[in-house]
Structures are given as C-alpha cells and as structure tokens.
Image (cartoon, coloured by chain):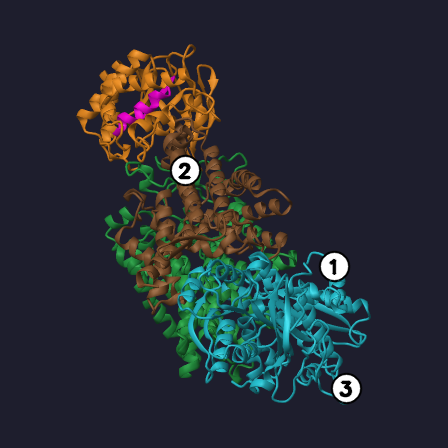
Chain colours: A brown, B cyan, C green, D orange
Amino acid sequence: MSAVTELLQQVVEGLGSGAVYASLALALVLIHRFTGIVNFAQGELAMLSTYVAWQLVASGMPFWLALPVTLAVSFAGGMLVERIVIRPVQGAPELTVVIVTVGLFIFVNALAGLIWSFTVKDFPQPFPDGGIDLAGVRTDWSTLGILGVVAVVMGLLYLLFQHTSVGLTMRAVACNPASARLSGIRVGRVLMLGWGLAATVGAVSGVLVAPVLFLEPNMMGGVLIYAFAAATLGGFDSPVGAVVGGVFVGVAETLTGAYVDVIGADLKVGVPLMIILAVLLVRPQGLFGRAAVERA
Amino acid sequence: MRKTTALRAAAVVTAALLTATACSSRRGQDAQDTAADGACKGQQTTGITDTTIKLGGIYPLSGPASAYGTISKGVAAYFKYVNDKGGIDGRKVEFVVRDDGYQPPKAVEEARRLVEQEKVFAVFQTLGTPSTAAVWDYLDKQKVPQPFVATGASVWGTDDKHPWTIGWQPNYVAEARVYAKYLKDERPHAKVAVLYQNDDFGKDLLGGFKKAVSGSGIQVVAQESYEVTDPSVSAQMANLARSGADVLLDVTTPKFGSQALAADARNTKWNPLHIVNNVAASAAVLRPVGFKNVQGVVSATYFKDPADPQWANDPEMKTYRDALHKYAPDADPDNQFNAYGWAVASSLHKALDTMKCPTREGLRDAVRNLKDVKVGLLLPGVTLSTGPGDAFPIETMQLMRFKGERWQLFGEPVDTRKEFGPLTK
Amino acid sequence: MNNVTASLAADRTRQLRAAPTVLLAVAAVAAPFYFAPFQVFQLTMVLLYAVALAGLNLLVGFGGQISLGHGAFFAAGAYSTAVMLDRYDTGHLATLPVAAAGCFLLGLGFGVPALRLRGLYLALVTLSFAVFLPPLLKRLEPVTGGSMGLTVDKMQPPAWSGLAEDQWMYFVVLAVASAALLLARNLLRSRVGRALRAVRDNEGAAEVMGVRLSLHKTLAFAWSAMFAGVAGCLYTWVIGFVSPDSFSFVLSITLLAGLVVGGLASLYGPLLGAAFVMYVPSVSQDLSEAAPGVVFGLLIITVMFVAPTGLAGLPGRVLGAVGRRLPRTTAIPDRTPEAASAPDAEPRPTAAPGFSPTPAPADPAVADAEPVGAPPRTTEKE
Amino acid sequence: MPSTRAHAGADFLNVSNLHAGYGQARVLQGLDLSVARGEVCAILGPNGAGKTTTLRALCGMVRGRGSVTLDGTELLGRSPEQAARLGVAHVPEGRGTFNDLTVEENLRVGAHLRTGPRRRGRAERAAVAADLERVHGYFPVLRRRSRQAAGSLSGGEQQMLAIGRALMLRPALLLLDEPSLGLAPLVTRELFEIVRAVNEEERTTVVVVEQNAQLALDIAHRAHVLEAGRLVLSGPAAQIREDGQVAEVYLGVSVRSRKAG
C-alpha cells in the first residue's frame, strides 16, 4: 500500500466516524436552534428510538416498514418530551433546563437497560455488505450509506426551513420568540415541533449507526461528546455546519490517531478538544455561525 | 451581651445534643461485633450464626458499567436456590446488593455500609479493579473477607499485604499465557496486532502476553488502544490492518468485541487469525456480528457459556436455567454474566463448606486453601486450587474455536501455572 | 430611645439569623460522636463535595460562566496529592497547599482562553477537557500509576486525639471545608465578588463601572479551580485511592448537576447539592433495586420542576416570601419562578434572554439580560 | 382637570380599572381610558408611568386585572398570539425584527395568520402579495431591501420593517411602543408621517407610546397622560399641545434621563 493510498484509506475511515458524529450533531443543532438549550439527552433519545425500531423488527415487521413507524413514534415522542419534561421548566434559568436534560439522560439510559438489558443487540444493516474499491481505497457501503442519508436529511431540513411556511415560522421563533408571538405564531407548538423534528433526526441517526456501533443502552454516550464537538465547530445553529463539523472532527481525529505518534489512539479523544479550542479562539462563533450567535 | 446570648444558646444546644448522643448514639453498634468460643476462640463471628450468614456485594447497577450489574442476579439466584434447599450447612444466606455505579468513592461508602451497618460476614463481591482497589485497604483493616472479587487483575493474587482479598476468575495474565502458548505451538513466527481496552484489564492482558511470548519468534507488531467512552473501534481496526499482522489479539469488552469482529469481517483484504479474549467471547457477542462472519475465531474459557447449545443438557446448566427462571425471572439465562454469578456463588458455597471455623478468619483461610475443588458450571478439567504461594483460584483455561453456530473446545485444558510457573509481581 | 429600640431590634434579627448557623455548627461538631462510622464517612464526603461545589458556584453561580470540566481540576488536586504521598512521601498536610496552588495556577491558565469563550462554548471546551483527562492520566503512567491508579495511606488520627479514623477525617475535612466556605463567602463580599456579580449581571455596565473584566473573570476561574483542587486533595486523604476512571466526565457533570440542584449563587446551595449527590443515589437504589438510574434521573427532573432555582431557594418559594425581582421597563416576568410554576403557565419564552439564538442587539431587553445559568436574583442570600 | 373618561360608550378600545405589573411591582393601578375607532391616540407620561406596560397588557405580553375590550371582545387573559388573532398588532420597543430573516421573510411572518397550514389557497397567496405591495407602497425602502437580512438594516429601516410586519397582519389595532427610540429626528418625522398616512388610508386605530411628546401630538387625535400608573389627563391632542402646564410638567420630565426606571 502506498503512503497516499494509506492516507486516503484513513480519510475514508474518518469520514465513516464523521458521518456518525454528524448525524447526531444535526439533532443537537436543531434543538439548540429552536430552544437555545443543549440537550444532553439527545443521544439517549436516539438510542431509545433505535430500540423501538429493533423491537419492531424483532417482532417480525420488515425493516423498511419499521423505519417509518419508528420515525413517527420518535416524532410524537419528541413532542411529548417537550410538553411533559421541558415545558414545566421553560421559564427557569437556562442551566436548570440543561440539568433536566441530564436527568433525562440518566433516566432514559437506565430505562433502556431495564427493558432491553445491556446485552448487545444485533440491528439489521439497511445497506448491503461489502464496499467498493477505488484505487486501492476501500469504502464500505455502510459508510457511503450513512454519509448519503445524512446529506439527504440535511437537504430536507434546508428545504423545510427555507422553502416552506412552517419552516419560516420555525426560523422566526428561533430568531425572536417574542416577536413571533406578537405575529400570532403559537410558539409552544413550534417548540414541540422542533423537539419532534430533532427526535426524528436523532432516530435516523440511531438507526444508521446501530449496525456499526451495535445497539446497547450506552451506544450513543460516546458519540455525544464528538457530536458536541461537531456542532460547536459548525456554529451550533447551522445544519450544514453540523455536518461539515462532524466530518471534519471524524477525519481529524482518525488522522491524528494514525499519524501523530505522540497522540496515538489513546489520546485522540483530545483532538476534538484542540479543534474546539482552536476554532473558538480564532472564530468564537464557529465555522458556520453568524457573529451575532455568540451567546451570553 | 449579644455574644453571651448566642454562646449560651450554643451551650444549651450542645449539651442537649451530647445528652442525646450519649443516650442513643449509633456509634455503639460496634459493640455488637461478636467472637467465637471453643477451638476458634477469639475469631470473628460477625454476620454468621448457626442458622444464617449475611453477605454483601457491591456491583455497578447504574452508570457506564451497568452491563456487569447482572452478575448480582446470578449470585442472588444461586443463594435463593440454596436457601430453598436448606441453606449452606444449615445456614440461610442473606445477600445484600449495593450499587456503586463503578465509582470508587461510592464503593468505599457502600463497603463501609455493608461492614458497619449491615454487619455482613464477608464482602462478596466487589466488581471492577478501581472499586476493588479502593476498598481492599479498608476491608483488610477491618479484617473482613473480600473473597472472589469480580476482576481479573493479577494484583489480587500477587499482592501479599491484603490476606483478606482474593480473586476468582483466571487473571488476565493467565489468559494471555494461554493465547501465547497456543501461538507458540501453532504459529511460532506469528506477527501479532493487539487491540486492547486502555485500562487495567487491557494492559494486564497485553503486558502478560508480551512477557509470555518474549524470547520466542512471536512479535507484537502493532497495538492500538481504545477508551471505554469511545463510540467505536473502527479507526483502531483500520490502523491494525495496516500492520499486515497475521494474528489479531482482541482484548475487548462485549460491545467493542462485536465491533472489532464486525470490522475484521468487513475487511476482506486482511484476514488474520482472530483471537478474542474471554470477556467478549460469549455467543451473545458473536451473534449480532453474524455467525458466518466469525468462523474460525479462537478464544479461551473456563466456565460453560449458557448461550452455547453444547451445554444444553449439562445437569448443572439445567439447574442454573431452572433456578434463574424461578428466582430471577427478569434475568436472561443466556447472558454469560448471570452464569458467571452463579458459578462464583457456587464456588463460594464450596469454600464456605471447607471452613474449619465458621468465622471470618475461617473463610479467609478456606479460600486460600482450596484443593482441586470442582464447581458445576466450570469447564471439565477446571478446578479451584489455592494454597501457600498460590492466591489464584482458577488458572486453567481451555482453548476453543468457533465453528458453525457454537464454540468447539479443542486441546487439553491449559494449566498456566504448570506451563509458565507461578505469577509474581 | 427610638434609636436604642431600633438597635436592639437589629441585634435580635442578627441573633435570629445567626441561630441556624450556630445550630448547624454545633450539630456539625456533635455529628461524628452520634452517627455510625460509615454515616460519618458519608458526611465527610458531603463536606468534601461541598468544597468543590462552592468553587464551581463562584464560577457558575456568581461568575455566570459554565464549566463542565471541574472534575478535571478535582482530579488534578487528587492526583497531585496522591503522587506527593506516593512518590515523595510528604506528609498529608504538605499536599494541601500544593494541590491548592497547583490548581489555582491551572485555573489561571484555563481562565485566559476562557475569556474568549462564553456560555455554551466554554461549557463544551471544559467538557472536552474532562473527557481528555483520564486517558492522559493513563498515558503518564510513570507518575500516575496508569490505569491501576495509586493507593496511598489515608490520614491517621494522632494518638492524643483519641478519635477513630472516620472521626478524625471528618474533623479535618470539616475544618478545611469551613475555611473554604468562609473564604468563598468573603470572596463574594469583597471587591472581587462584587465585581464578579457585576460582570455576571451586565458585562457592559461592569466595564463602565471600571471593573477590569478580564482580570476578574480569569481570577474567578482560578479561585474556582482551586476549590476543586482542594476538594480533590481531601478526596485522596479520605479515599486513599485514585484511578483515572474515577474522574471521568461523569464526575464533572455530576458536580454541575449537584450545584444547580442545590441552588446557584446561594451560600447553602453547595451543601445541599453535595448532600443530593451523596445521598440520592443510595435512596434511588432503595426505591428501585432493578434500575436505580431510572429513579435517580426522575428525582433530578422532579427537583428541578419543584425548585427550578435549586433546593436552597425552595424554602423561600414555599413561604412565598421571596422578594420578587423588581421590574424595569424591560422587566422579564416570564423568567420569575412564579411564572414557570403557575398552573396555567404557558411557555413564555417571549423575553427569556439567551433564548433567542441571535439576540437582537437593538433589543434593550438583552442589555440587562441575565447570563446563561444565572438564577433570578431573588434567590441570592447575600 | 378634564374628565378622565372623555367619551365612553361607543369606544372601539375600552380600558377600565386595569392593574398590571411584574411580580410584586405594581405598575398600573386602575387605569381607565378609551380609544375611538379609527383614532390615533398618544399615551404620554414620564418614565415609569406605565406607558409601555399598558401596551404590553393590551397585547397579552403582561398579565393584567380589570377589563380591556376591543370592539366588545375581552382582551385580558389572552396570550400575545391570541391577541394577534383578534387583530392587535404590537410593534414592541426595540422593534423586534427577525434579524436573521430577510426583509421579505419578515413581512411574510407578519402574514403568518393568513398563510397557516390550512389557508394556502391561491386567493390567500394573492392577498398576501397584495399586502406586500401595500406595505411596499408605504415603505418603498423595504422593497429595495427585500432580500437583505433584517439585521443589516439601519435603525430607521428596521422600525419601518417592524411596522410593515405589523401591517401585514391587517390589524384592527396597531400598538406602537416608542417608535422614535434611537432614530435620527428626520427619520422619526418621516416615520410618523407614514403612520398618519396608514391611519388615514386604512382607518386603522393606532395607539402610540412616545417620549417625544411633540411628535406624537402632531399625529394624534387624542392624548392621554399617565403618571405613576394612573391617568392624570386626557383630551384632544391639539388641546394638550397648547396647554402650557402640560408642556411644563410633562416635557420638563421628559428631558431627564430616558431610561432610569
């Protein structure tokens, strides 16, 4: 294997992990954009959705039917979480809301363990086995599949926000909830919609990564940190930024782990740290954030 | 004047509190510790009577390591089963389980609770190296037995300052030696790539392996670690693949084991002999990867995997399944951790049976003087043996290879003590 | 005459206010003679966590900066102590100033980049630091003992005291914790504290007032890290064992959760939060053997529902005696706890500052917006 | 002093015994006033008198006690979005534009109530287009800046956008809170002229709160002066403008610091 091929192979590996991070980062960014909070439980909700899909498939439903059902359940679940768990603390200090999501994290994680145990579950792989070989660089179909779906989800979100009246309403709420109310927008419903949407995107993320990471209650815990890094890098408000950030973090992490001996695989978790720090010191609003995004 | 009032108030309150303390102090409970008479005179009999014995275990029921918490269910099921059959030597076992969330300070708190409040006879078991290491000084000082800790670090056996603590499962170094011996026999010039978990478990095994193969033609050509908090090991696997090694030693815990096996199967260009360590060798780990993808994978074991059909008619396995069904209906009998709990609990049963005195000292000495004790769920040929200079109850493992839909044992059980000599620090 | 009565009345109120403190002090001294050793150990751990939370409180509660990395400073204090005891065999007491000073400097170092980061971003950078620390500790094996950790001697009671180990440890930690909590209190009453709060409440105004923003924010970080380091040092004294996986990012999140549950920007908040962190997991297990996490998660959420400003603010809320925040023309009724808990409360994010991802600079409501995480000022005990 | 209840009865907007405040701070303590249909009404008064609070109580941003009726319908106890559905358009202090959205998007959000999910027929779209046209007619600059982000507009343009967005609602009642805040005098004057034009052409009832009493009185038909949460004076704008005492008491106060309370 030549050095170049090897490098490219590493980049492909990085794209694979990056796609995983990006998919969860998308959901994080959605919630943050509409409610201004960082949802620690996002990964766990995605994990829960994945278990729903698993349960449906395990009880005999074909995967391609189970998927839309799961997405619908997740959408409703996300709205329900907003209504039951988040709204009661809506007026409280922001940190209180964040800690509520931490409580939700612990709760959902333990609940999944209680219901489905901590044994690894096999989750059907929607993409074909194997991969393609391009000039000695091997790419799994699953990597391509995840990247593709993430790109499609990102595109759909873009269309939703930029070209529909619901999207316009959502952006108005995200931008200035007070004025949105004065224009007659029912902000509460829009927030529920935002949580439902984020939960759906999270469910897509969970279903995509489950065949690769293997489904168990702690599946998303490790992804969360990287998804945070990806979202921060992308400015925490932009779906495109989240995806670019995720891919960037994945590639950077893999390359440093492979080529920088001082860092090595054990310290590569420090790479997101360095990236976040570097990005924020140079551009406090992230790569894709607007200058005004910087929050007090 | 203000000051005097405050002082006076304080004095009154202090006096009141001290009186209350004197009357109902809970500290006095230490006095309840009991000692034996007769031949065993002076030895501690706290937590044990002629009809009862109280044990306390500390497991991660919450937090990142909660997958292992289910061991407590296997243990509890065993004791309930034994109690229904009359108990251990006529003593009913009371088993108290506490949760430490895999956090050492919490383990210390719970150990203190078990010893000081629950007045347990012994702390059976603590799980994980950090939690065990955090409490063994305390238990040693209190002279409370800490038998059969649920961790395979070699330090429990090599240490000589903590006579009250002893391990049970084959230590990670012993397991590494089994693989080393296998490779020496089968592939004397192997180039080995190692994937290991970056903690005591992974490092102990890796270190033991390197030591065992030193001087032979076997080389470790690449090693990659991962953190338990990492989402996946695919990047590490890609790096190992670059090394071109012909053997992959896979030192992982279940989820990462599945990931590594799957990554190996996906990569059609690199086809090393895949050795997966015992912790991740359960059929439950292999099934999600797809049995067709794990053919020929090698591992070693010492107890019967409940998910393995070859033990379906084993009498002890049947007892285990029935008992688990009856006493822990929510626990999955196929989960190897439940079987582990059952096996370790029955091992303790055997050790308690051999006590000369029904005292804490008696148990301490009994677990250090086991002679070829057979335990139902352990593999044929694997027994518990300890003695002076040997504080490792199980040091024998047998190799197995995955074929079709199950593991097939091959070769003779490997007694690592015989092969490599006793393990020292 | 009137003056005399007035001053007497003032004395009376002061006494009344001092009474709980005195009671608390007496109870604290008497406790180890009453409770069983393991309960004394629990109290010791509560005090120890309270020190760390008091430090975090300086930063989050009063400084308005969120740190999800205080577990890392805690670990730094614990490890520096363990290494000194293990490698250099210094006495226990010698480790305290070193851990404190070391973490102060570390915090100072961190405070500089922290200046440029606000709210969420600072939280994420500190969180990544907390995630990064355990593997780093493992890498530095020659010093830190690697993943096996270090076992060191616990502090032993001197013979003259006639105390048991747990009692002695308790008193040592009590002394350090009291000193630390007093220091925190005095820090907040000093110029630094006033400056901190001014910064939290309105950076612009603080700057106008001549507060040297950057200096005070950096110092807040340093002080805060020092408290965490001291708590870490005590941890090593009490537990006698450190290992990298004891200080995972879960610890950092637990600390922040404890502080918010206890009550931000309140003096008793850290104590209550520490008690929550210490006792509630055990209670959860008593309530549900099968899945303590389910109960623990629910309890966190429930506490936040009942007391959105933390347990320390709860009595005030219950009594309804909270002096509600005085409005200005830009008052934000939605953020008062009353609005949040009123039965007919709707989501009224209308004026919640920081709610809108892009606060309009022209909107005066933002000018006196509270920073992320700052509680309504009604909960202040000062 | 003139009667505080000038011409009750056939009023379009009727406020009686309104109490409102924030937390324990009571700002309005029993306010009575009324506005006739099609009237421009100015609310004047010193800082902290409760002018802004009055507007906020009308549109539901602040809870109030008492009674506020709009064409016979009770407004109190409604949320801002409900009030908007009843035709109350509030242009808040500080304008409250959606800075990340383009100018046109801002205006479309204003028409939100008519383009909701269930109302997107051809006729509705045509109506929105017509409304856009109408608003562009009042504020030609908004047409030129159609694709620009609202955040990049000048203060005066943002204020125009805010009013334009409110007009997209086709309001029955337009509430303007300090429209002159932070704007150059020339721009302010232009703005007030447009408000007058809107009122004259569409017969929209307007309530404007303003520190710059002179300006407000120029376009208002009637004026109400508040002090400490109570109505102290009301009458035809022209009369109040002429009244030397008011000028002294009120304008004197207005010279003091603007935002101290």
Q: Magenta segment, which residues? A: D158-177
Whether residue B116 is visible here, answered yes or no, is no
Is C336 or C109 nearer to us in this picture? C109
Q: Is residue C294 left or right of residue B197?
A: right
Label 1 to label 3: alpha-carbon separation: 41 Å
Residue mark closest to the camera, 2 vs 3: 2
Q: Which residue is depicted at the point 62% across and 68% down? A: B58
**Residue D173 counted in the magenta span:** yes
Q: Are marks 1 and 3 on the same chain?
A: yes
Label 1 to label 2: alpha-carbon separation: 49 Å
Q: Is residue C175 left or right of residue C293?
A: left
Q: What kind of residue is marked 2? A: Leu
Give the secondary structure at mark 2: helix
Is B217 or B320 nearer to us in this picture? B217
Q: The disc numbered 3 marks a residue on which chain?
A: B
A18 above or below B300?
above
Residue designated by label 2 = A157
Q: What kind of residue is marked 1? A: His
Q: Which residue is depicted at the point 38% across and 19% down? A: D125
D13 above or below C101?
above
Is C227 or B28 nearer to us in this picture? C227
Residue designated by label 1 = B325
Whichever of labels 1 and 3 marks the residue nearer the N terminus, that label is: 3
